[in-house]
Image (cartoon, rainbow, N blue to C red):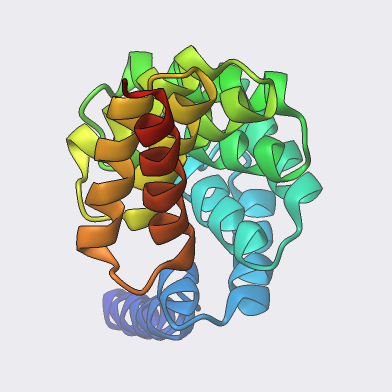
Amino acid sequence: MRRAFLLAFFIGGMALSLYAQEKPDALALYRERRYSEAVAVCLQEIQETPRRVDSYVVLGWSLLALDRYQEALDYSERALAFAPYDYRLLMNAGESAYFLGAYDKALSYFQQYVAVAPTGRHIPEVYAYMGEIYLRWGEFYHADIAFSTAVYHRKDVPTWWIRLGYAREQSRQLRLALAAYEEAVKLAPSNQEATAGVERVREVLARSTP
């Protein structure tokens, strides 16, 4: 009897081990850019374990990669209902809302990210997104602050320096705008938007100099 029990236990253990080995890894699929497959695995995991936060996170990443922004936002918000301080969910929700044009909602999620993870790995991108939102609203001083913070944390993105220069140019901070455009040119000498910004601001400054 005991021998039969041990044999059954051994066979059952082998089956579970094989199942664990064969079960798809959603994160691995995402890293391999097999986004649709990652989505399917995450949805299955959520069906089995409805509050598995990591599944919602990888699901959000995969849906964003597929440009399925509304679904990414819906699932992120569903998970935030029981994990409101998960910075990964906040980032996914913010990005999804941003690409849907829901800028008020996006800004709220990005601000929550800053509050929850002020030194998080996506802090530069979060401030850059915030800067873009403020530019769209014509709030150039706020955009200046946001992009200044983005380039403080990460100095090697020419586009952010260009957007910082534009925000300063629009608020008539011309010398500061020139400095930002020049920094962009240093990083990307062939960038026409950066060189045009330098030339444009220099011309205005030259005309205004007695």
Residue at (57% x, 82% y) in the render: 34
Q: Is residue 7 at all visible to an observer of this figure?
A: yes
Q: Nearer the viewer, residue 47 or 207?
A: 207
Q: Nearer the viewer, residue 207 or 144?
A: 207
Picture coordinates of residue 69 (x, y %)? 74, 50
- Looking at the image, residue 138 sits to the left or right of residue 168; the answer is right
Picture coordinates of residue 70 (x, y %)? 80, 46
Q: Nearer the viewer, residue 169 or 41?
A: 169
Q: Which quadrant of the view contains residue 120?
A: top left
Q: Quadrant of the N terminus?
A: bottom left
Looking at the image, how many numbered discs can be counted on the residues?
Answer: 0
**Does 22 appear above or below 210?**
below
- Looking at the image, residue 202 sits to the left or right of residue 61; the answer is left
Picture coordinates of residue 49 (x, y %)? 58, 46
Picture coordinates of residue 179 (x, y %)? 24, 38
Q: Which quadrant of the view contains residue 66?
A: bottom right
Residue at (58% x, 16% y) in the render: 108
Q: Residue furthest front?
A: 210
- Looking at the image, residue 39 sits to the left or right of residue 51; the answer is right
Residue at (20% x, 28% y) in the render: 119
Q: Quadrant of the C terminus?
A: top left
- Looking at the image, residue 170 sits to the left or right of residue 25; the answer is right
Q: Is residue 83 at all visible to an observer of this figure?
A: no
**Does 110 appear above or below 29?**
above
